[in-house]
Amino acid sequence: MARIAILPGSFDPVTVGHLDIVKRSTSLFDKIIIGLGINSMKQTMFTTEQRMKWLQTTFKEFPNVEVKAYEGLTVNFCKQEQAKYILRGLRTSTDFQFEKAIAQMNQLLEAEIETVFILSLPQYAPVSSTIVRDIIRHGGDVKQFLPNGVTP
Ligand code: ADP
């Protein structure tokens, strides 16, 4: 059976950190689906369409990576896509504490779906969409933090 993983996130916007996690995970899975989570309660800087477009541009050269938007629980999206793995990146111990709770809750919801963590490379550990948005708001240059073709 094909090993399918979903990397869920808001990708507001996608960064070189996300790109690195996907690059380093492609050999582990037959297919990776980048799941753009649509959460109407969450205020985003960029529209769903824009975030989707940037994800498509970023991953267009990756033969076993797809980009899809979804609403609702990640475990339900996994079942819909027959994905047995949730892929997440870890930068810091704070990420770990937060991710641990989500992964354990997802495990209780769907015992057969495993969360797989990939540690960020040191050079990407400080890169976050939140800080990128702050820099953009204040007129700074974020080019080095974003994949080619992502130009806010
Ligand atoms: P969310 O909205 O769920 O926080 P994000 O879009 O910010 O999701 O990130 C999606 C995934 O990518 C998360 O697992 C997050 O920890 C990971 N990630 C984000 N930035 C980096 C980075 N610089 N290095 C490694 N992983 C990262």
Image (cartoon, rainbow, N blue to C red):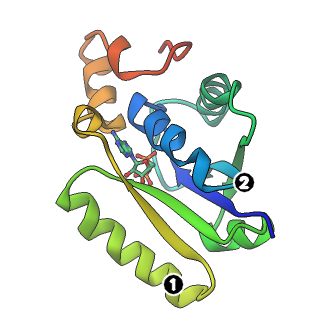
Image quadrant containing the N terminus: bottom right
Q: Is any part of residue 135 visible from this angle?
A: yes
- Give the numbered dot on residue 107: 1
Q: Is mark 1 within 8 Å of ligand 1?
A: no
Q: Amino acid at mark 2?
A: Asp
The front one of 87 and 149 is: 87
Say left or right for 7 vs 82: left
Q: Residue furthest front?
A: 27
Local secondary structure at mark 1: helix
Residue at 59% of width from left, 55% of height from top? 28
Answer with the quarter of the image where residue 125 lies: top left
Mark 1 Cα shell of 10 Å, populated few (<14), some (14-19), many (≥20): some
Q: Which residue is identified by label 2?
A: 30
Q: Is any part of residue 38 visible from this angle?
A: no
Local secondary structure at mark 2: loop
Residue at 31% of width from left, 37% of height from top? 128
Q: Amino acid at mark 1?
A: Gln
Answer with the quarter of the image where residue 18 lies: top left
